[in-house]
Image: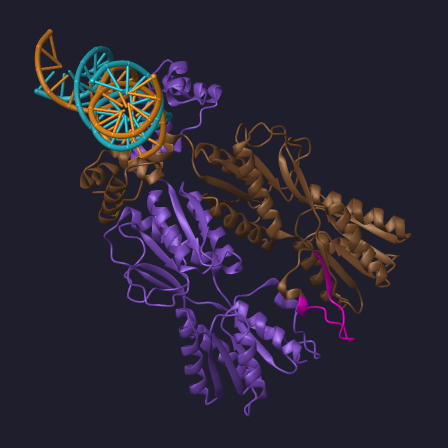
Chain colours: A purple, B brown, C cyan, D orange
Amino acid sequence: MAVGIKDVARVAGVSAATVSRVLAGKAVDAAMQARVLDAVKSTGYRPNLAARRLRSRHSNVIGLIVADIRNPFFTAVSRSVETVAAARGMQVILCNTDEDPAKEAMYLDLMHQERAAGVILAPSRQRVARTEWPGGERPVVLIDRAIPGADLDCVLLDNERMAAVLVEHLHTQGHRRIAGLFGAMSMTGLERRAGFERAAKALGLETQAIAVPHSAGEAERALTGLLSGPHRPDAVVASNGVMLLNVLRTLRAQGLSVPNDMALAGFDNNDWMDFVGQGASGAGGISVIEQPVEEIGRTATTMLLDRLDNPRAPTRKVVLAGKLVARG
Amino acid sequence: MAVGIKDVARVAGVSAATVSRVLAGKAVDAAMQARVLDAVKSTGYRPNLAARRLRSRHSNVIGLIVADIRNPFFTAVSRSVETVAAARGMQVILCNTDEDPAKEAMYLDLMHQERAAGVILAPSRQRVARTEWPGGERPVVLIDRAIPGADLDCVLLDNERMAAVLVEHLHTQGHRRIAGLFGAMSMTGLERRAGFERAAKALGLETQAIAVPHSAGEAERALTGLLSGPHRPDAVVASNGVMLLNVLRTLRAQGLSVPNDMALAGFDNNDWMDFVGQGASGAGGISVIEQPVEEIGRTATTMLLDRLDNPRAPTRKVVLAGKLVARG
DNA sequence: GTGCATTGAGAAAACGTTTTCTCGTGAATT
DNA sequence: AATTCACGAGAAAACGTTTTCTCAATGCAC
């Protein structure tokens, strides 16, 4: 019923091996090649990728495992990965772990079983130190978050410096009491916090950095505490998009407007940010660090493909700068 | 090097067939089963899915092909699909066509070659009528957009009615001159436009419905025309998220605020909408139809799995209602 | 106690490719 | 002109599973 390579071979009057060679682009007689291609077209032959993969012992799929498919950052990166991969003849399987280490392990295992050529992984937040690193012998490139101690290729944002840039920007805008809310569980949160505190110290600012557990209501609680405390801030830095929305929600509930009553800054630019928090003066809004999503995806994919060619090369760590999008 | 089923069999002192049976959960002697499971664990055996797929002639992957991975609607649906599929032992491969019919065809072909069990497809916008339907003999469930004339399972939003609900809502808010911008290329746009006009007619409203080509700047141009025209609207309905952002951008460029100068409504709810367009009165904002994303994904997946069990059943079309999120 | 159905496990075939092996043909070199 | 060489194509092996086939052992009925 399904048409196989032997059917094509029979129609073309050649051997199956020759059909395989034509399809693989190897040197064959021109007349034969034409006959084979005709036969392929007329039979509607579609190679069975399972058989191909089994025999050739390598596949052209790369896995892209992200921690949160709803995060626009990851979808943007995935588009870039897919574009680059397609240009090099590879296809991408996108998997979503929802920040669940168990699902992450499951998908890594799945990629192993699928014999994927390699994996690009945005690790989920880790509660505990990892005992084993992902991948085994399979090439892995990390994006967005590093795994401490793991000797793997990775491409990251310069979180430390970008957080500092944000603080400096708020300082030039005249803010002097800056609060920061940082994810407690992620490497990213720690790095951004470090940059925040370094810059604040250098500028002699009064700051309050809070590590916020990643559970519902924690950001609200932390911010509410700050607002009613003795050193009420005039600006807030949120270390990720979810937290930024929570801050916005809390401020709104308290009747505070951005940026008139409180300046707000964070990471990852979004379309809608142009429309929120317009001050009475007409200026203002949410300033953010925009990540170079296209470049992150492109770099990660290129690194992975490079490593496929050259498995024993030393691992590389690429740290990219973001761009300040100043709104007010 | 890689450990295969024969290695496991040797360690366990049984035949490869027995290992296969144990792993498939078939009835085997308890003692043997224990020995096999031990051997699997001690050898770290990972089945080669390519070989399994080749021999067993069916796979447990379903393809999810969406038109725009950056659209939160599709990512939300994909999470739901993935959850349901995983619960039934299936895995999901997510592919993004970026509204490109060529990429769509390519991915459908890829799913064929991969011998995927079935496909859930959100079709790209079609410039021309489709000559052939996707799938071939492979089960396909359509989501979000139907393909006229295709006899396929599908689960859709009741676009016509929901657009009418939006118009009725704006009417109760006191708006009488309502403009609508609708995508010219998609079935979805046409349906929403029809509902818009039906409701407006029923209410005796003065409306202007414009079909907007899906290219940059068109929405701006259309809206600008309306604003400077003789019948300047007091409310605008945008038929999709991108268009809504463009409307917002245009209004802002003209110095108009939402909802004081102009009411705004559309489709698909987003977190940020709570924070934009807060009127001076404290009320207001962007009213939208929220799609039942979880249910759409769940229904589509269930329908696909049902069809796998029962390929000859008549096709079903499920039309779901959305929920009005009224803001002002 | 014999015959028959039933169960369970091993042997071997099968899945659809790619790759290796082998061989024949024609060109190139001596 | 003879020998080697390069090349291209077919035959056959191989990839790692699942499934079918076969057979031995066990249980049950008569």
In the image shown, does B234 or B306 lie closer to the viewer? Answer: B306
User: Which image quarter is the N terminus of chain B in?
Assistant: top left
Vertical placement of residue A31 versus B10, above or below: above
In the image shown, does B39 or A38 lie closer to the viewer? Answer: B39
Residue at x 40% of width, y 48% of height: A63
The quarter holding residue A195 reads bottom left
Where residue B77 appears, as percent x and y from the top left, is 57, 50
The quarter holding residue D23 reads top left
Q: Is residue A325 visible?
A: no
User: Which image quarter is the C terminus of chain B in?
Assistant: bottom right
**Magenta segment includes B288:** yes
In the image shown, does A266 or B53 lie closer to the viewer? Answer: B53
- Left/right of residue B323 with respect to residue B114 in the rendered view: right
- Left/right of residue A212 with respect to residue C12 in the rendered view: right
Where residue A190 appears, as percent x and y from the top left, is 40, 74
Residue at x 44% of width, y 39% of height: B60
Where residue A119 appears, as percent x and y from the top left, is 36, 51
Residue at x 48% of width, y 32% of height: B112
Query: Which residues are drawn in magenta?
Result: B274-289
